[in-house]
Structure formats: structure tokens, C-alpha cells
Amino acid sequence: MAITASLSLISGANDLVSDALALVTDASLSKAGTTTALANTTGLARKTTTTTDQYTLLYADEFTADKAHKVYIKNTSTVAAEFFTIHIDDEKLGLMYAGDWCLLPWAATDGVKAAFTVTFAATWATADTAVFDGVTIALGATETTAAMAILVAAAKYPNFTATVGGSVVTFTAKDSNDLSLIEEGAASDDYVITTNGNGTGTVARTVTPSASANDIKITPAQTANTIEFMAFYE
């Protein structure tokens, strides 16, 4: 399989330079340091904005770092004054006006995802609950700390993955840019234990997060517009 990107720059005499310009160049989109074509794509997608806030199109955490990824972006507007500002994280790359498009190389260097543990201890009773990340888990008839840990780890969380080891559950953030997480050694409103007995859940941070600096972001100059994008990646 081959993936080829083509660019044509055509200009008449005296339009851009004194002579007519006809520049055509091709590039094969290959994996880093090889001639093997990139094997994956996100598929062509569109994002319609509803505010002038900044939007994230692609999260670096979801791609292998420091490879030969490419990102295609196009402003689909037909109104000449409408534009998007393109950023890689906080680094401003430039403005894309109506009809503009680009193909960017993207290293996709990710950040460090936060991780922490919850250790269950003391006495747990039937119907005792643990609440975290908007998910409530109730203990069944098996009244042990290990049973509570299994139930918690098996739940589906919007922002975390969870694994269990004995009476300890380890939570890992899905996104390194989610820095609003439990602080080490501090009581937290994010994890709540409600019991009929003496059950406890002690939180301890194990990995301190740092945000990714390579997310692909856009900031629309107008409230409503549509941008088209696609990533080719290893």
C-alpha cells in the first residue's frame, strides 16, 4: 500500500514572480526511517465549532510518540474573512482562512498520565458504596475489602482506567492533560466512601501528571464554522 501527497503551485507570469511558476512535488507518507507506508488513519472527520473557545482536534496521548505522523487540516468555509488559528498545544502555527489547507508533520510527544491508588481496609458491609469520577459502586453480599476492590476496578470510568491487586485499586488517567486529579496525601472530594460500618478507602498518588505539549488545537475567529481534519499515523 502506498500513500502519496501531491502539491501543485501554479502562478502566471508577474503574478508571484516575473516568470510563470509551475511547481509540482510529491511525497510518500512513510513510517519513520523506512519506505513502508503509514498504515493507519483516523479517517476524514469534521468539527463544527459553536463558540470561539479553543478546541482540541487530536490528543497526542492517543498516538505513538516521535514518529512520522502527518495531519491534514482544511478550513471548509467559503467566507473569505473566516479563519482558524492552528496550534500545537500552546505554540501558534498560523492562521487558516476560508479554503486554506495544510499537511503537517506531527511528533505527537505525549505527557505523563496521573496514577494513584485507593486501598480498601477495615470492615465493609453489604450496600456500602464508593463513589469516584461520577460512578457509584455498591458492595454486594461478599463483605471483604478485596470484593470491594474488584467491583471498583470493574466499573466504567469516563476519565480513568482501573486495575485491581488484592484490596488495592490503581487508577490511571486516560488523558495526560487532565491535571485536576487527587492531590497526594490530601483528603479528596473526588473519592467518597459512604458506609454502614467502618470501611475505608485511602488515596495515595503514585505518578504525578504532566500535560502533553503536542495536542493539535484550533481556535475559531467566528462562532460557527467547520474544519476538516485527518491524521495518518504509525
Image (cartoon, rainbow, N blue to C red):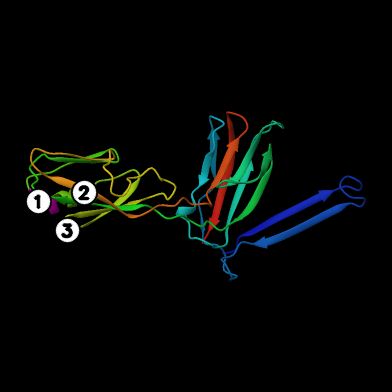
Q: Earlier in the sequence, mark 1 or mark 3?
A: 1
- Left or right, 95 with respect to 61, comes to right
Give the secondary structure at mark 1.
loop
Whole-number angstrom distance, CA of label 1 to CA of label 3? 10 Å
- Left or right, 125 with respect to 109, comes to left
Q: Which kind of residue does numbered mark 1 sit on? A: Thr
Residue in front for this viewpoint, 28 or 128: 128
Give the residues drawn in magenta, as a range: 143-147
Q: Which mark is residue 166?
A: 3
Q: Which kind of residue does numbered mark 3 sit on? A: Gly
Where residue 52 sits in the image (x, y, percent)? Answer: 57, 31
Which residue is disc 1 drawn over? Answer: 144
- Left or right, 152 with respect to 35, comes to left
Residue plotted at (88% across, 47% down): 12
Residue in front for this viewpoint, 66 or 195: 195
Which residue is disc 2 drawn over? Answer: 202
Q: Which kind of residue does numbered mark 2 sit on? A: Thr
Give the secondary structure at mark 2.
strand
